[in-house]
Image: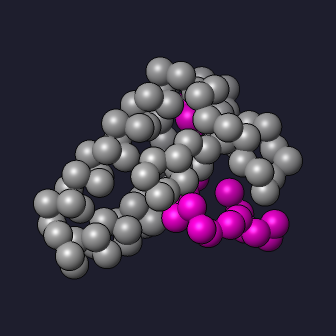
């Protein structure tokens, strides 16, 4: 399966990494590496993630890494990374995914 990052997901990953980098550049780099490792797992096992509780769409799933939700959509032969959020953040119905 092919992995595609939405522009929003890239923006979110960058924001989170910059926030972590304020305390520790080393931890920020490790965070990014670990996110990419988790996404490699999704590539091998697309159905690994659970359905996103706030949504009714069975093609949108999430996996949890540390305190973050990696939310993705399975679409034909590709996986689209939609967003990365802290686990305390909920999705809202009017959000575009």
Q: Position of residue 49 (x, y in %)?
A: 61, 35
Q: Position of residue 61 (x, y in %)?
A: 66, 41
Q: Position of residue 90 (x, y in %)?
A: 68, 66
Q: Classify 53 as above or below 60.
A: below
Q: Is residue 33 shown left or right of residue 46? A: left
Q: Is residue 28 shown left or right of residue 38? A: left
Residue at point 20%, 76% (across, down): 23
Q: Is residue 58 visible?
A: yes
Q: Specify the segment rendered in magenta.
A: 78-97
Report the front residue among 75 and 87: 87
Q: Position of residue 88 (x, y in %)?
A: 59, 68
Q: Classify 33 as above or below 84.
A: above
Residue at point 72%, 48% (across, down): 52
Q: Is residue 81 visible?
A: no
Q: Is residue 39 shown left or right of residue 47? A: left
Query: In which quarter of the view is residue 96 placed?
Result: bottom right
- Quarter that holds the C terminus: bottom right
**Residue furthest toward the left?**
26
Q: Is residue 47 shown left or right of residue 41? A: right
Q: Classify 71 as above or below 47.
A: below
* 82 in magenta: yes
* 16 in magenta: no
């Amino acid at each position: 399966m092919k992995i595609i990052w939405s522009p929003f997901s890239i923006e979110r990953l960058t924001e989170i990494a910059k926030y972590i980098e304020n305390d520790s550049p080393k931890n920020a780099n490790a965070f990014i590496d670990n996110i990419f490792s988790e996404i490699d797992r999704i590539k091998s096992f697309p159905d690994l993630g659970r359905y996103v509780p706030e949504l009714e769409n069975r093609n949108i799933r999430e996996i949890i890494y540390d305190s973050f939700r990696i939310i993705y959509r399975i679409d034909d032969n590709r996986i689209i990374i939609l967003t990365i959020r802290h686990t305390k953040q909920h999705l809202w119905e009017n959000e575009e995914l």
